[in-house]
């Protein structure tokens, strides 16, 4: 049998209320005001306020900016997967690896073990 698109693409269910709560928690842990987070993430302060209160659904694009500003994992922010809160393997890490081929090679070898 062929795989349906639904089976091939895992849909990440965004837990809206939870995402807002996690956003707030991460911001408080970093001791950032909403204004400071807004400045770092390039997302308006009213929007951050709406997201934290769960009135807006956190979309991936915004989550990526917020996660980068807060130094947490995007998937943790969206889904609450605690194993992904720290050391996010995100775009920044991938970009860095492209600039450091020697580290990339070593990682690649270790992944194949």
Image (cartoon, grey):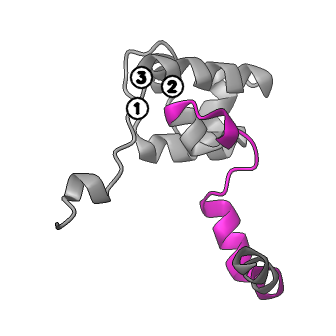
Q: Magenta stretch: give its range.
A: 79-104
- Depicted 65 relative to depicted 14: above or below: below
Between 8 and 62, the one lying in front of the other is 8
Quadrant, the C terminus: bottom right
Tell me whether the residue at label 3 lies in contact with that at label 1, contact meaning CB atoms closer than 8 angstroms.
yes
Q: CA distance from mark 3 to mark 2?
A: 5 Å
Q: Earlier in the sequence, mark 2 or mark 1?
A: 1
Circle 2: element type: helix
Prevailing secondary structure of the magenta residues? helix
Residue at the farthest front position: 1
- Depicted 111 relative to depicted 46: above or below: below
Tell me whether the residue at label 3 lies in contact with that at label 2, contact meaning CB atoms closer than 8 angstroms.
yes
Circle 1: element type: loop
The image shows residue 84 at horizontal and vertical percentages of: 66, 42
Between 37 and 62, the one lying in front of the other is 62
Tell me whether the residue at label 2 lies in contact with that at label 1, contact meaning CB atoms closer than 8 angstroms.
yes
Q: CA distance from mark 3 to mark 1?
A: 6 Å
């Amino acid at each position: 049998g062929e795989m349906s698109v639904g089976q091939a693409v895992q849909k990440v269910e965004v837990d809206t209320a939870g995402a807002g709560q996690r956003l707030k928690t991460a911001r408080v842990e970093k001791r950032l005001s909403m204004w400071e987070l807004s400045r770092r993430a390039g997302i308006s302060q009213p929007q951050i306020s709406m997201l934290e209160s769960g009135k807006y659904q956190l979309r991936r694009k915004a989550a990526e900016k917020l996660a980068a500003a807060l130094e947490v994992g995007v998937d943790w922010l969206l889904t609450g997967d605690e194993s992904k809160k720290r050391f996010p393997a995100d775009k920044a890490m991938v970009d860095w690896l492209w600039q450091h081929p020697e580290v990339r090679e070593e990682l690649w070898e270790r992944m194949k073990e």
